[in-house]
Amino acid sequence: MANKESQKAQPVVVAQAGRMEQFHIWKHDLGMDSCVMIIADYQCEGVTLDQSTLFAALAKVVHRQPSLAVRFSSDRRQFLRLPSIDLAALIEFADGAELQDVLEAQLLRRFDTDAEMPLWRLVVINACTVVFAYQHALGDGQSGIAFHRALWTALNELEYPITSASQVVPVQDHIELVPPSEKLIDLSVSFTKFCSGIAKAFAPKALTKSASWSGNPIPLVLSTKTAVRLLSYTPQEAAKLLQLCKAHDATLTGLLLALAAAVLSRSLAAHPRSTEYKTIAMGVPITLRRFTGATADTMCNHVSGCFLRPPVQRANAASDEPVQLDDALWASAAQLTKKLHSKIATCKQEPGMLKFLFGDYKGYLEGRPGRPRTYGFELSNVGPFPSIAGTSSEEGEHNGHKWRITQTYFAQCDSPTGAATKLNAIGTPTGGLGLSVQWGDGAVDDSVSEALYEGVKDAIQRLLIANTADSSS
């Protein structure tokens, strides 16, 4: 009898953690990362996101997204099935809170990866804004969109009013996770890439001085304290930006990179080593879903990245504007767009380099403090937020209620060892745009980071005003 009970208590292995997943697990455990967040504002006439409504909807979401029902094994090599999930332990209601304050607080909170608990949580602000925070090993940025699409769908399927719902969700006996990217596509690394990657990762500190600006070195004492600033744009404003980009052979990503390069160049002009910096070390994550076949409703970690080095621009002393909205800016945006597109074909090599750590992710990461950061700036654009079926004016009102998502944001951590500054972008289902500017505590001087936020904000506003004036003339 006792033997049977002990067998029942044995954890069920759902999947082996892939290389990228193990890398993120160890970054988190070593205090180098906390969470990824996708935020969405939900609106429905006559209904709010109270506890019963969320419990009922999340029960559906957990069954559709098995990544929400796993934890790590003690050796960090496997995902284990949770027998059930107590939703009450995962949801915090924060009426009256400011979103920026909530995001900064969440970035300070790591998960208890030794507990028999899921690796995600929610904060609900004013019964409408849902902050979905999850451990990076569970998924990439687009995985957060997949969660919200599942929640959105579930909310539209419910029959209202909901008077009660169980807080405990039983997990199916058999669940499957999407395989890691190395199981689905070829991540082979060229000899040239191998040599350059090894040199960057393991060169002695004395040889790592670079002419590329990458912010302050990785601190010896790690903290995930991160500042966040938010910007939002209506569908009409976002459409104007996209029209401008198209007219100048650029994408929105290319434009944002060019704006960041211009603003950071102006800040670097006041740096004591300003003449030593020739370029700005920039990183851009690139999704591998186009290769792996993962859909918009899939939670997985299929992502790579690329390295860009736009030149440091010498500031125009005659101008008080942080960014000149001239032909040079658009030429930079077009060039960065072209460079980024050229990296897509070879970006699969980046996660392929993890193979050469031979499973010692912990040892590699423990050697990072004190070394230069890889990037001074990172732009993460998770792209548009696809709408779901049944959200047009003619559909989805069989129960008299129709939920909408009106605004979205994207934020992430890895502040201690990641890029010194970050700009995260996400679309809304109606075509709007949400931006978040981030920087880790001590990663750069506050004057540089605040100037980045104000400079990007000011430049986009002036672009929109100029476009409106041109359209009306």
Image (cartoon, rainbow, N blue to C red):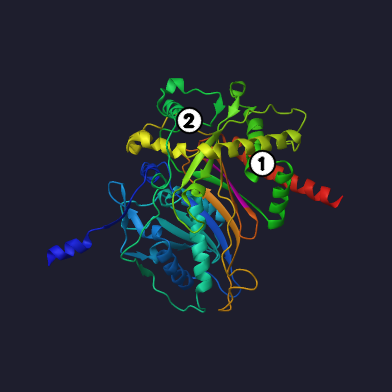
Three-letter amino acid code at the position of disc 2: Pro
Rendered position, 107 above or below 69: above
Q: Amino acid at mark 1?
A: Leu
Residue at position x 65%, y 57% in the image: 431
- Secondary structure at badge 2 equals loop
Is there any visible trace of residue 417 in the rendered image? no
Residue 170 is situated, as x and y percent measured from the top left of the image, at: 34, 68
Question: Is residue 359 part of the magenta span, yes or no?
Answer: no
Question: How far across and down, in percent of the image, does residue 151 sit?
Answer: 50, 65
Q: Kindly identify the residue that appears in the image at 58 percent across and 59 percent down.
A: 386
Please name which of the two marks, 2 or 1, marks the residue nearer to the observer. Answer: 1
Helix, strand or loop status at disc 1: helix
In x, y percent, where is residue 17? 34, 48
The residue at the point 70 percent across, 28 percent down is 315
Image quarter hosting the N terminus: bottom left
Name the residue tied to disc 2.
217
> Mainly helix, strand or loop, the magenta region?
strand
Q: Is residue 131 left or right of residue 331?
A: left
**Above or below, 48 relative to 100:** below
The residue range painted magenta reads 434-439
Query: How crowded is the residue under tag 2: few (<14 C-alpha within 10 Å), some, or many (20+)?
Result: many
Instruction: Name the foreground residue: 354 vs 438.
Output: 354
Q: Which residue is mark 1?
A: 255
